Amino acid sequence: MPDPDAVRALRDAAPSALAVLVRRYGDFAACEDAMQEALIAASAQWPVEGVPDSPRAWLVRVASRRYIDEVRSDVARRRRESLAVELEPPPAAVAAVDDTLTLFLLCCHPALARPAQLALTLRAVGGLTTAEIGRALLLPEATIAQRISRAKARIRASGEGFRMPRPADLESRLVALRHVLYLMFTEGHTASSGDELARVDLSAEAIRLTRQLLESAPDASGETTGLLALMLLTDARRAARTDPAGALVPLDEQDRSHWNRRMIEEGVALVTEVLDRAPIGPYQLQAAIAAVHDEAASTDETDWIEILGLYDLLERMAPGPMVTLGRIVALAMVQGPEAGVAALERAEASGTGAALTEHHRTWAVRAHLLERAGATDAASLAFVEAARRTLNGPEQRYLAAKAETLRAAR
């Protein structure tokens, strides 16, 4: 069995260690290869010898050796040994500064299109697998792998190297960075696979880095503030999302006394402040929706008309399958489940219908709406299909149990 302490130390140290290497040598692809070899060495040594006092310094030292060895090999083949001597820096202590956020910005390289920026950054710095990135972006795993491979090649061909963006380029990179942090948080909040509902370490890291971004970069758009508010307001419900056995508890059945009031108060304050001073953006709207949920005493007392209005704005500003699905839920709460089912059918028949139909959340929403409408047989079948399509254990068990309950009640 893997040593949990060693695994945790590797996850925490690897992104910032990679940042040190990229700053030092400039070749992202080669640095990432060297870091992968260092991680393999650490996974073998640390469980036996213990986690070093400074995991990041250990990874930097070992990866640097691997990198220099590879460069020396290449140089020898090309008869340029002197270049390898110049590449090797004098021994130096690894700075205590956390470079993870810097590396995120560096990965949002101008030579890459936005989809490639997202895929590369989530893989190299966020630590997500290609399968997890594919599920987050609603794309096949093979497509993500191709994007990452081509992104590395394009950066190498551009000759620009990895460096901090000029002030004029910063805002465009911040757009990509916020999207990466949002996807990291989303994967942490509800894991796309595995036997745990959430990956708390991933969502906590996304919140930490978003706080750091808000403190270190201008927020003229207000979207970084909105993103942090959204994360806090969503994560505030985490303790109530599972029961003591780890089973999923849906929103309308959660004990709201277990919600984190401190996080809710901070999130509400942030979104209230930013809506008063900045142009409205998608993350601000999502945070406002989360705030309406968090301030309500129950599902029945939730202001669903306000939520529907916010979703109408969000769908115009940043349309997408999950936004459409959220709006359908709100519409059903305002106008009834039959209206929700009809809206879902229209959405599936539209241009974005394929992405909706393939996703397990669409089938789960359909099942809940059909159950509320009294179509229990159809609801049961939809719950079965939703359970079949998700790879998250608690979600799968919850959906399968709902299907069985409806079948037993016939």
Image (cartoon, rainbow, N blue to C red):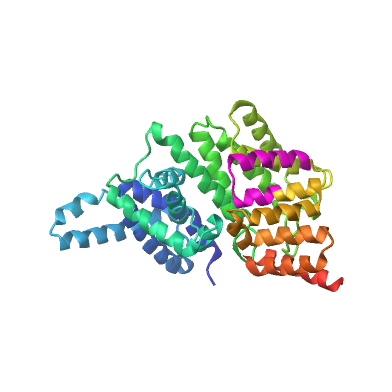
Observer able to see residue 92: no
Viewer-closest of 88 and 317: 317
Quadrant assignment, res 108: top left
Q: In the image, which residues are magenta?
A: 304-327
Image coordinates of residue 384 in percent, x first then y, are: 71, 70
Residue 60 located left or right of residue 277: left
Viewer-closest of 304 and 235: 304
As drawn, the residue found furthest toward the right would be 409
Question: Where is the C terminus found, in terms of image quarters?
Answer: bottom right
Viewer-closest of 393 and 409: 409
Q: Main secondary structure of the magenta part?
A: helix
Q: Is residue 274 magenta?
A: no
Which residue lies at the image location 37% right of the left edge and 64% below the top edge? 37
As drawn, the residue found furthest toward the left would be 79
Which residue lies at the image location 35% right of the left edge and 58% below the top edge? 63
Please say if 361 is above or below 263.
below
Please say if 313 is above or below 273.
below
How many numbered circles does the render carry?
0
Observer able to see residue 156: yes
Q: Is residue 320 magenta?
A: yes
Which residue lies at the image location 55% right of the left edge and 51% below the top edge? 183
Image coordinates of residue 227 in percent, x first then y, are: 59, 41
Quadrant assignment, res 195: bottom right
Residue 54 located left or right of residue 247: left
As drawn, the residue found furthest toward the top would be 277
Which residue lies at the image location 48% right of the left edge and 63% below the top edge? 141
